[in-house]
Image: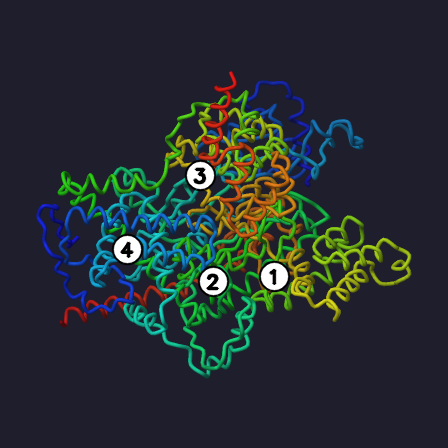
């Protein structure tokens, strides 16, 4: 890092370098660390401000906000946290905070993944509202080698391009529309959603889709540099900054990622004999559904085994009990022998006893909501993946009354899945849940907390 | 199944109740040999080693050699003596207690120098996964093959992962030694996977997948809600067209849309097909890019708990889906599956379709018509065709032009025909996939390549089985043959096809790619010297 960091008593003015030339509306690509002098207190406070933005984005994404809503959200968050009276200082703050957080979030795979997603989303929703000219300026910064499709080529594929546009509910492109012909692997997101016409390995990207291309590039560059930063961190920075930056860096990430359910066993172990009762009272619908299906079918496909298995681990079911639990069900269907051969391994694996011995973390709502269950699968978020009819039936079975049911369904229709889950929680427990539900294990521990305190007062 | 196996079962019956694992010595071998010899299989048995283990009460039989030079002959046949005893008439004494098709039991041989070893195309397999790097050109990456993971499944489902080999001989020797039931191919890693633990010690674990074919796995059991002939692991000629459709749709898109050229389709040995896309560009895709391709092919949204499995929104459908529909899906549905699967012939069947129609009034109108069977029974045409025409007519008639209904006919066809991929397999580089030419441990069928241009001709029920191949070899006698034994068996065509239409064009392209990138590098270093 080229940034120089000074302790707070050593007040100095920012000496911004060539950055003055950069127009305010464009977004920096954070290619290299700036030659800026930073006060130690700014080092931390800028980073915290940016973290607030990223955390807000994370919440927005997990609530399934639509792109337009995300754009507004990012605008608000940016305005609230990153504004500065002077444009040049705002840019400095942008750059400095990014590089500080890069250091904070380079250190483990999980941190890198989170930071990468949130920074990419931030970039995307800052890029989207830019004027075409400003967008082109950013594209120029990227040195994109792609040319716009010629008139002749456009005419030859006009029909297909129109088909794609209409499949997304957009009008067919006019003759002056600009399309870029790029290798399909550069725009995975557009390929995945069938939002582009693809022919012989090339995707035809419309100007209004260019954000996807640019965001993908941003993401892959950041991904690479995060690895490099991590190397620098482990090889030198951590040791050099042992007494100054390292403690700040190490504290910054843990304070904002929410509780870690892979470690917390606060509410103690649950035992096999009362697991049915506990499931009924304190499991969120996604887990309750998997649990019931397992009891019913004596089988769950891989996605379901992972989602429920890791949740149970987070809840405090130890490995032996977990094995006994799964064995009891699966052996009814596939037989004991097949269970031991095929399934026991993956359970031990989840507990970090096999394979690469990673102690896997229970899935968060974000992960569950964005999963894509297929035929025969029961995992995923019921609020998102169930039909309304099935969801109503499931909620009724849980004991949600008809008035609350309508509120829940209303949230679902607006794709606020976690809010729907929160409302379900509140309806069932008769208590507000101000923090909202962000993690199935949080649902469980909050539920347990309420039920235990009720028990205490009644006894 | 062949008689000799039945004979052998007769011989084993008498030893029921003995300890779980017993060593059958020289003379026991003679017993089996004699029994089988009567049916003319002695050339095979003469290659048995001296010591044979027989694993008894587990209803499965394993014959293994104590010699390290043995090889798995995979499964031979299914039969289950316990299950069948007494039920079927014993028309020729105690030895006909076996009913090959209905069993849960598997018979596996581990045979020293098994004839099948000669059939397994080790060299072709290794040349393929070396992608030209086994050549002499200075641009070849000599470490390439050695960084590829092979994984073996041994008897009793023991998995041996992260095997690596530097050449075909090493692979062949290891297979001979370990005698796996199944061989899987994994990714090419950054470092030799067999030495991965040495690298994982360091803080920056450099051990990671670096290259991997883009693979697809299509399994018939995922179609259980739209096939009424069989379910689970079973397939028949009535439902197999679903696989034909899948091959046609995916193969066309991989070539025309994504521009891939080196695509290998393989029968998985029982209930599905595997696809290997081997172009350099495909092998170097990231997980995210793989997921994008897989999602491009995905039209099924929602899980077991949402009714509609296919939802096509918008004023048009994507060109890829439109092409698939008009070129493949529509015809297969209307001319084949509709009738063969009797999709609208029963109440249960048509209710399933009616459930997919969002407009209640149309659904109930159709229901009324179809419940009144007299009206349709007079027609000479197939009842499914008549009903489908009625359904289409109502849905597409002028008065129902609402957004939801417009796509309904297509949605029904997609639901019953469109390929269902096991997406997870394609998404990640480190997924293993069974090597071609393995023998499926339960069916005994060889995983032969399928020609996508003639996939409608492919018949899974006539794929050569191991026992068939061995019989063919034995009948041929011990003629000296320089060009490998497979020529004379029914595997010959499969291997010839593998070479001519997949391996040779692939290796030619790899050679060009290696030369080009080498020359480019040379050019670059020359330029930099010039400065």
Looking at the image, is mark 4 or mark 2 nearer the viewer?
4
| Residue corresponding to mark 2 | A191
Q: Residues within 10 Å of mark 1 (few under 14, many from 20)?
A: some
SS for callout 1:
loop
Q: Residues within 10 Å of mark 4 (few under 14, many from 20)?
A: some
Residue B74, percent across and down? 55, 39
Looking at the image, is mark 1 or mark 4 nearer the viewer?
4
Q: Residues within 10 Å of mark 3 (few under 14, many from 20)?
A: few
Residue A191, percent across and down? 47, 62
Chain identifier of the residue bearing label 4 in the image: A
| Residues at circles 4 and 3 in contact by the CB criterion of under 8 Å | no
Residue B85, percent across and down? 74, 27
Q: CA distance from mark 4 to mark 2?
A: 34 Å
Residue B520, percent across and down? 27, 69
* Residue A387, above or below B514: above
Q: CA distance from mark 2 to mark 3?
A: 39 Å
* Residue B372, above or below A308: below
Earlier along the polypeptide chain: callout 4 or callout 3? 4
SS for callout 3:
loop
Q: Do marks 1 and 4 both belong to one polypeptide chain? A: no
Q: Do marks 2 and 3 both belong to one polypeptide chain? A: yes
| Residue corresponding to mark 3 | A434
Q: Which is more toward the observer, B180 or A454?
A: A454
| Residues at circles 1 and 4 in contact by the CB criterion of under 8 Å | no
Q: Describe residue A425's horizontal placement relative to residue B103 as left or right.
A: left
Query: Looking at this rendering, what residue extends furthest in the top direction?
Result: A459
Q: Which mark is residue A82?
A: 4
SS for callout 2:
helix
Q: Which mark is residue B312?
A: 1
Looking at the image, is mark 2 or mark 3 nearer the viewer?
3
Earlier along the polypeptide chain: callout 2 or callout 3? 2
Q: Do marks 4 and 3 both belong to one polypeptide chain? A: yes
């Amino acid at each position: 890092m080229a940034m120089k960091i000074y302790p707070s008593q050593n007040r100095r003015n920012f000496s911004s370098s060539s950055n003055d030339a950069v127009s305010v509306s464009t977004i920096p690509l954070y290619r290299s660390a700036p030659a800026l002098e930073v006060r130690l207190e700014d080092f931390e406070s800028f980073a915290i401000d940016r973290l607030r933005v990223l955390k807000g984005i994370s919440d927005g994404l997990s609530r399934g906000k639509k792109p337009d809503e995300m754009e507004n959200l990012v605008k608000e968050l940016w305005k609230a946290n990153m504004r500065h009276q002077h444009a040049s200082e705002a840019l400095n703050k942008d750059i400095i905070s990014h590089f500080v957080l890069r250091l904070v979030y380079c250190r483990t795979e999980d941190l890198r993944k989170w930071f990468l997603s949130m920074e990419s989303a931030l970039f995307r929703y800052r890029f989207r509202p830019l004027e075409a000219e400003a967008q082109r300026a950013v594209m120029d910064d990227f040195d994109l080698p792609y040319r716009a499709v010629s008139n002749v080529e456009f005419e030859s594929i006009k029909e297909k391009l129109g088909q794609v546009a209409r499949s997304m509910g957009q009008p067919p492109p006019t003759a002056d529309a600009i399309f870029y012909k790029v290798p399909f692997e550069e725009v995975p997101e557009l390929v995945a959603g069938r939002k582009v016409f693809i022919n012989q390995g090339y995707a035809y990207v419309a100007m209004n889709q260019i954000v996807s291309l640019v965001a993908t590039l941003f993401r892959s560059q950041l991904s690479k540099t995060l690895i490099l930063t991590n190397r620098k961190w482990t090889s030198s920075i951590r040791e050099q900054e042992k007494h100054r930056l390292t403690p700040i860096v190490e504290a910054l990430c843990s304070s904002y990622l929410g509780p870690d359910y892979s470690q917390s066993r606060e509410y103690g172990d649950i035992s096999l004999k009362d697991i049915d009762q506990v499931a009924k009272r304190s499991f969120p619908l996604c887990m309750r559904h998997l649990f019931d299906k397992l009891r019913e079918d004596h089988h769950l496909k891989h996605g379901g085994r992972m989602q429920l298995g890791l949740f149970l681990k987070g809840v405090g079911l130890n490995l032996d009990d977990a094995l006994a639990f799964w064995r009891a069900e699966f052996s009814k269907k596939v037989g004991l022998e097949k269970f031991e051969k095929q399934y026991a391994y993956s359970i031990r694996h989840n507990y970090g006893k096999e394979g690469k011995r990673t102690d896997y973390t229970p899935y968060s709502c974000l992960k569950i909501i964005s999963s894509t269950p297929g035929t025969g699968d029961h995992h995923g978020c019921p609020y998102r993946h169930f039909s309304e009819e099935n969801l109503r039936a499931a909620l009724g079975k849980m004991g949600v009354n008809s008035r609350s049911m309508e509120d829940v369904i209303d949230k679902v229709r607006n794709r606020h899945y976690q809010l729907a889950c929160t409302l379900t929680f509140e309806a069932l427990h008769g208590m507000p849940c101000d923090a909202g539900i962000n993690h199935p294990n949080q649902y469980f521990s909050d539920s347990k907390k309420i039920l235990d305190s009720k028990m205490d007062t009644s006894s | 199944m062949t008689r000799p196996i039945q004979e052998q079962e007769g011989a084993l019956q008498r030893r029921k109740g003995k300890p779980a694992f017993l060593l059958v010595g020289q003379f026991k071998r003679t017993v089996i040999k004699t029994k089988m010899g009567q049916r003319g299989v002695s050339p095979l048995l003469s290659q048995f080693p001296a010591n044979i283990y027989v694993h008894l009460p587990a209803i499965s039989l394993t014959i293994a050699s104590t010699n390290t030079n043995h090889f798995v002959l995979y499964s031979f046949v299914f039969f289950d003596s316990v299950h069948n005893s007494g039920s079927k008439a014993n028309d020729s004494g105690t030895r006909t207690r076996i009913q090959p098709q209905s069993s849960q039991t598997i018979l596996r041989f581990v045979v020293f120098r098994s004839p099948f070893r000669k059939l397994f195309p080790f060299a072709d397999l290794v040349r393929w996964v070396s992608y030209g790097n086994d050549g002499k050109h200075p641009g070849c990456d000599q470490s390439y093959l050695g960084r590829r993971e092979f994984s073996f499944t041994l008897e009793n489902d023991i998995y041996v992962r992260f095997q690596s080999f530097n050449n075909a001989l090493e692979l062949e020797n290891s297979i001979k030694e370990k005698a796996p039931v199944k061989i899987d191919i994994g990714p090419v890693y950054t470092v030799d996977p067999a030495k991965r633990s040495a690298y994982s010690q360091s803080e920056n674990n450099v051990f990671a997948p670096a290259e991997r074919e883009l693979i697809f796995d299509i399994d018939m059991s995922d179609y259980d809600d739209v096939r009424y002939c069989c379910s689970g692991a079973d397939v028949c000629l009535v439902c197999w067209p679903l696989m034909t459709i899948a091959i046609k749709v995916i193969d066309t898109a991989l070539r025309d849309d994504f521009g891939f050229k080196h695509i290998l389709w393989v029968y998985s040995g029982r209930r599905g097909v595997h696809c290997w896309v081997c172009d350099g560009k495909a092998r170097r895709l990231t997980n995210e890019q793989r997921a994008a391709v897989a999602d491009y092919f995905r039209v099924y949204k929602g899980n077991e708990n949402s009714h509609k499995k296919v939802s096509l929104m918008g004023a048009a459908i994507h060109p890829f889906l439109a092409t698939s529909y008009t070129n493949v899906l529509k015809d297969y549905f209307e001319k084949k599956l509709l009738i063969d699967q009797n999709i609208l012939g029963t109440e249960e069947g048509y209710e399933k379709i009616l459930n997919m129609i969002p407009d209640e009034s149309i659904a109930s109108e159709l229901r009324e018509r179809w419940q009144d069977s007299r009206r349709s029974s007079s027609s000479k045409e197939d009842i499914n065709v008549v009903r489908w025409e009625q359904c289409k007519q109502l849905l597409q008639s002028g008065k129902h032009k609402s957004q939801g209904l417009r796509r309904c006919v297509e949605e029904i066809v997609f639901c019953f025909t469109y390929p269902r991929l096991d997406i997870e397999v394609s998404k990640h580089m480190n997924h293993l996939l069974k090597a071609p030419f393995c023998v499926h441990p339960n069916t005994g069928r060889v995983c032969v390549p399928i020609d996508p241009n003639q996939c409608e001709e492919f018949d899974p029920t006539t794929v050569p089985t191991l026992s068939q191949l061995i019989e063919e070899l034995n009948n041929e006698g011990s003629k000296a043959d320089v060009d490998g034994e497979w020529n004379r068996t029914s595997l010959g065509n499969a291997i010839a096809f593998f070479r001519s239409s997949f391996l040779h064009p692939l290796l030619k392209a790899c050679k060009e790619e290696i030369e080009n990138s080498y020359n480019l590098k040379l050019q670059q270093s020359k330029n930099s010297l010039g400065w």
